[in-house]
Amino acid sequence: MENHYITLENREKITISNVLDVDAFDEDNLWANLKDGGIELTGEKLNIEKLDLEEGLLVVSGKINSFSYTDKKVKEKGRFLKVFGKKP
């Protein structure tokens, strides 16, 4: 397994490695798929500064309130549809 890291700077900028794609994003939430599962970010005024899928690198700025890992990829859970209030 490839090494994975998350760097959080003063709750204002987060860098995440091993990112495959971003499923959903708005200024309060972000859901991304990693090589081993997924990750959910919550915050305020979130902004994607960098998304390089070749490198697997995601950089998000704003006020980071929390992040958590998910076992399954976001697409499999149907969260993208829930974020925008659509029924699957």
Image: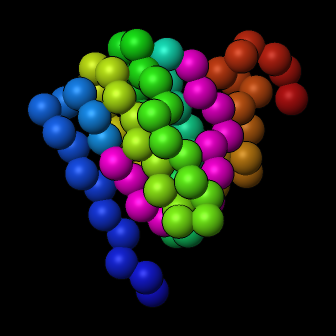
Q: Percent from the top left, x then y, of residue 6?
A: 29, 55
Residue 33 versus residue 7: which sits nearer the camera? 7
Q: Residue furthest right?
A: 88
Q: Residue furthest bottom?
A: 1
Q: Percent from the top left, x then y, of residue 70?
A: 48, 51
Q: Is residue 18 magenta?
A: yes
Task: State which quarter of the image contains the C terminus.
Answer: top right
Q: Percent from the top left, x then y, of residue 22?
A: 62, 43
Residue at point 29%, 27% (across, down): 64
User: Is residue 79 left or right of 15 when viewed as pictured?
Assistant: right
Task: State which quarter of the image contains the N terminus.
Answer: bottom left
Residue at point 28%, 34% (across, down): 13
Residue at point 34%, 48% (across, down): 15
Residue 11 versus residue 36: which sits nearer the camera? 11
User: Is residue 35 left or right of 77 when viewed as pictured?
Assistant: left
Q: Quadrant of residue 43?
A: top left
**Residue 11 in view, yes or no:** yes
Colouring chosen for the image of the structure = rainbow
User: Is residue 30 left or right of 54 when viewed as pictured?
Assistant: left
Q: What is the span of residues highlighted in magenta in the rendered image?
A: 15-26
Q: Main secondary structure of the magenta part?
A: strand
Residue at point 49%, 42% (across, down): 50
Q: Is residue 16 magenta?
A: yes
Q: Is residue 54 above or below residue 62?
A: below
Q: Is residue 38 above or below residue 88?
A: below
Q: Percent from the top left, x then y, of residue 81?
A: 76, 27
**Residue 71 in view, yes or no:** no
Residue 77 versus residue 13: which sits nearer the camera? 13
